[in-house]
Image (tube, rainbow, N blue to C red):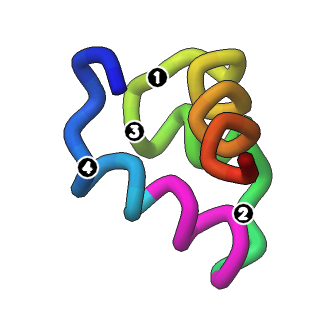
Amino acid sequence: MDAIKMKTVVEILRAYYELGLSQEEIAQQQHLSKSKVNRIITERLF
């Protein structure tokens, strides 16, 4: 899991699945690119 800390991954997944935020909203909150957020979400599905 490259340089992203597990805490950040958990925050991203919670925001997406529990809070229903869009990937764009999460990216802005976490100061990451939308593609990075998408990658984190899709990699955790498998």
- How many residues crowd mark 4 within 10 Å: few (<14), some (14–19), many (20+)? few
Image point 39% across, 62% down: which residue?
10
Image point 66% across, 26% down: which residue?
39
Toward the front, the furthest residue is 46
Residue 21's mark?
Answer: 2
Q: Disc 2, disc 4: CB below 8 Å?
A: no
Residue picked out by circle 3 = 30
**Disc 3 residue type (three-letter):** Gln
Q: Disc 3, disc 1: CB below 8 Å?
A: yes
- Residue 40 falls in image quadrant: top right
Which mark sits nearer the N-terminus, 1 or 2?
Answer: 2
Q: Disc 1, disc 2: CB below 8 Å?
A: no
Q: Report the magenta residues as a range.
A: 12-18
Does residue 39 appear left or right of residue 4 in this picture?
right
* Marks 1 and 2, how far apart at CA: 15 Å
Residue picked out by circle 1 = 32
- How many residues crowd mark 1 within 10 Å: few (<14), some (14–19), many (20+)? few
* Marks 4 and 1, how far apart at CA: 15 Å
Which mark sits nearer the N-terminus, 4 or 1?
Answer: 4
Residue 20 coordinates in the image, percent (x, y): 76, 73
Q: Disc 4, disc 1: CB below 8 Å?
A: no
**Disc 2 residue type (three-letter):** Leu
**Residue at disc 2, secondary structure:** loop
